[in-house]
Amino acid sequence: MFSLLKVRAMEQRLCEWPAGADGAPKAISRLEGQIEEQKHLRLQDAKQVEAKAARIKEWVTNKLRELEQQNQLLREQNDRCNQQLELLRNHIAAQGSRNCTVSILGIS
């Protein structure tokens, strides 16, 4: 934004320069050079911003892929743990019913 204001100020000064004044061609050339330099700097800034945005996008994409893989692994682990928990519950239930049967029959 600041560069745009500088360019506008230079263009305004260029327009206000009196016609036929001594040194006008040199001043016009100098101001035109400054304008071109500012345009070049803005273009470089835009390229840098674009490159940074591309790097950020790549990082986010890679991080998302990594998190999705981690999420899948956690889901698989959770499924295995739930299966083991169910087996343990069934085993405990079977042990409990066997103990009840043994006590009813008077077997210690």
Image (spheres, helix red, strand yellow):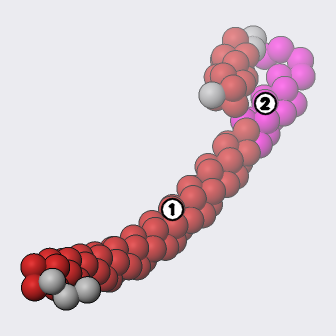
Q: Which image quarter holds the N terminus?
A: top right
Query: Foreground residue, 38 or 82?
Result: 82
The answer to whether one can see residue 99 in this image is: yes
Q: Which residue is mark 1?
A: 60
Q: Position of residue 71 (x, y in %)?
A: 39, 70
Q: Quadrant of residue 54?
A: bottom right
Horizontal and vertical percent position of residue 30 = 84, 33
* Pair 2/1: label in front: 1
Compute the Cα span from label 2 to label 1. 43 Å
Name the residue tied to disc 2: 31
Q: Which residues are magenta?
A: 20-37
The answer to whether residue 94 is seen in the rendering is no
From the viewer's perspective, tell me whether residue 19 is left or right of residue 86.
right
Q: Is residue 17 above or below residue 85?
A: above
Is 26 included in the stretch rendered in magenta? yes
- Say which amino acid is labelled 1: Val
**Residue situated in front as seen by the camera: 60 or 40:** 60
**Residue located 70% across and 31% down the image:** 3
- Which residue is at a point 29% across and 76% down the rendered structure image? 85
Of 86 and 102, nearer the camera is 102
**Kind of residue indicated by mark 2:** Leu
- Say whether residue 10 is left or right of residue 88: right
Question: Tag 1's secondary structure?
Answer: helix
Above or below residue 91? Residue 26 is above
Residue 75, picture quadrant: bottom left
Q: Residues within 10 Å of mark 2 (few under 14, many from 20)?
A: some
> Of marks 2 and 1, which one's residue comes earlier in the chain?
2
Task: State whether the magenta stretch is mostly helix, strand or loop.
Answer: helix
- How would you rate the neighbour count of disc 1 (Cα within 10 Å): few for under 14, some for 14-19, many for 20 or more? few
Q: Name the quarter where the C terminus is drawn.
A: bottom left
